[in-house]
Amino acid sequence: ARKDAEKIKLLQEKKDRAKSARQYLKSWKALKEGKEKTWKFAKAQQNWIERNIYDRKSIPKSLFNDSALEYLGSTKGKARERILEEALKITGGPSMEEKILAAEAKKAEDQKEEEKEAIDADIKQIRSQYKRAEKIAASLSKKE
C-alpha cells in the first residue's frame, strides 16, 4: 500500500510539472504577443521542456506548434547548442522509415493484441519525434 501511495504521489508530481511547464509556455507566448506583462524565465521549466519536447503526451502538437517551437528558437548559448545537437542527432541517425520498419517487423512477430497496440503507439511517437526534430533543427539552424 505504501509503494502504491508513493507511485501515485510521483505520478501526480509528474502531472503537476507538466501542467506548470505548459502554462509557462503559454505565458511566454502571451508575453510575446503583448497579451501578458508578467513572465519570468525559469531554468527548471526550460529544462523540463528540453527533456520532454519530443513527447507528444507531455507537449501536445498544438502547444508544440503554437509556442514550444518558437520558445526553443529563442534560446541562447549552450542551451541552444544542446537542443540543436539533439535534434540533429535524431534526424541524422537511423531514418524514420528504418525505425518504423523495425517496429512493424516486431509487430508482425507479436501475437498479443496489446503488444501490437503498444507498437502502433511507438510508431506514432517515432513519427512525431522525427517531425519535431526536423522543425527544431530548421528553427535553430537559421538564426542566432
Image (cartoon, rainbow, N blue to C red):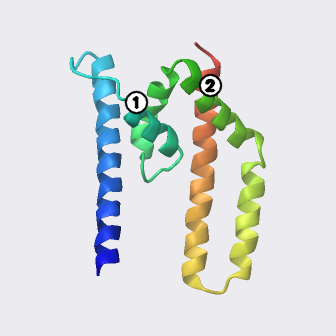
Which residue is denoted by mark 1 in the rendering?
43
Per the model, the C-alpha gap separating discs 2 and 1 is 16 Å
Q: x, y percentage for residue 135?
A: 59, 33
- Residue 53's label in the rendered image is none
Residue at far bottom of view: 111
Q: Quadrant of the N terminus?
A: bottom left
The reply to whether the C-beta atoms of the residues labelled 2 and 1 are less than 8 Å apart is no
Amino acid identity at mark 2:
Glu
Q: Quadrant of residue 15?
A: bottom left
The residue at 71%/59% (across/down) is 100
Q: As displayed, is residue 35 above or below residue 44? A: above
Q: x, y percentage for residue 60?
A: 41, 47
Considering the numbered disc 2 on the image, is that residue within a helix, a strand or a loop?
Answer: helix
In this rendering, would 58 be left or right of 127? left
The residue at 58%/13% (across/down) is 144
Considering the numbered disc 1 on the image, is that residue within a helix, a strand or a loop?
Answer: helix
Residue at far top of view: 144
Mark closer to the chain start, 2 or 1: 1
- Residue 81's label in the rendered image is 2
Front-lying residue, 50 or 1:
1
| Label 2, residues with CA under 10 Å away: few <14, some 14-19, many ≥20 | some
Q: Quadrant of residue 102?
A: bottom right
The residue at 43%/41% (across/down) is 48
Amino acid identity at mark 1:
Lys
Front-lying residue, 77 or 59:
77
Q: x, y percentage for residue 28?
A: 32, 25
Q: As displayed, is residue 58 above or below residue 66? A: below
Q: x, y percentage for residue 19?
A: 30, 46
Q: As displayed, is residue 111 above or below residue 107? A: below
In this rendering, would 134 be left or right of 95? left
Residue at far front of view: 2
